[in-house]
Image: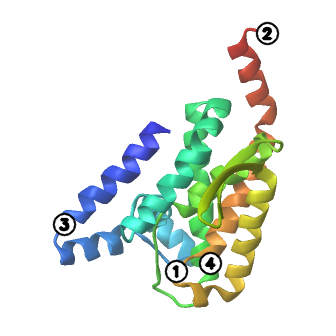
Amino acid sequence: MPLVFVALWGCFVAASLLPDEAHRRLLGDWGALSGEVRSWPATLDALRDGRLARLATALFLHADWAHLIGNLLFLLIFGPPAERAMGPWRFLALFLAGGVVANLAAVLAIATPGQLVIGASGAVSALIGAYLALFPGARLGLVVPLGLFLQFVKMPAAVLIGVWAALQLVYTFIGPAFGAVAWSAHLAGFAFGGVFALIARRAIARRLRHRSGF
């Protein structure tokens, strides 16, 4: 996870140092664009000229600090336990593959061609899906405001993640009212992460037994 964290942070800082015109050109050249994979011939063309790789490179581009910090916060919450369970290489594969699948879902869902899709939200959503599949009985800390006081409570992760997933589904249909966010990418990444973890569960269990010496 440290590699992913540093890569996201470093790419954003490097991009933010560019002049405005160069920054816009960077996003346009390396971000994913809607309308490029709507047909099989178009997908083959995008594969041949390298444009399909933008589904991956878009993960390391963010619109602003709020966009980046939101993703890093979720990464810090769900990333470490998922990486400890899966191992660094399987974790990295999940992040990249989940992000690509999520970005693909976003560019297919956006009706207007040429719309830019950037950010690691879909990849982070894949981590959330994997976390739920790996630790269905886990509990997450939550700060609840009670009048003038803040109360720290622990709630089942399945409940909190379930609420989050339900909101992503609602926002997918009324998303324009909540800003230019590719909500469908979150859902696709979440589903991919859950399936990925379930398929890899036996290998993960063997890895954990090996680490514990049993």
Reading the image, the residue beneath label 2 is: 214
Look at label 3 and name its amino acid: Leu
> For mark 4, what is the residue?
108
The x, y position of residue 169, in whole percent, is 74, 75
Label 2 vs label 4, nearer the camera: 2
Q: Secondary structure at mark 3?
A: loop
Tell me the kind of residue under disc 4: Leu
Q: Nearer the viewer, mark 3 or mark 4?
A: 3
Looking at the picture, tell me which residue is in the foreground, 58 or 133: 133
**Secondary element at image label 2:** loop
Front-lying residue, 170 or 196 = 170
- Disc 1 from disc 2: Cα separation: 49 Å
Above-or-below relation of 121 to 155:
below
First of labels 3, 1 by sequence position: 3
CA distance separating discs 3 and 4: 30 Å
Query: Is residue 130 among what the camera can see?
Result: no
How dense is the environment of label 1, judged by Cα within 10 Å: few (below 14), some, or many (20 and up)?
A: many
Q: Are marks 3 and 1 in contact (CB under 8 Å)?
A: no
Q: Which residue is mark 1?
A: 34
**Residue furthest to the top:** 213
Quarter-wise, where is residue 28 in the image?
Answer: bottom left
Quarter occupied by the C terminus = top right
Mark 4–mark 1 CB contact (< 8 Å): yes
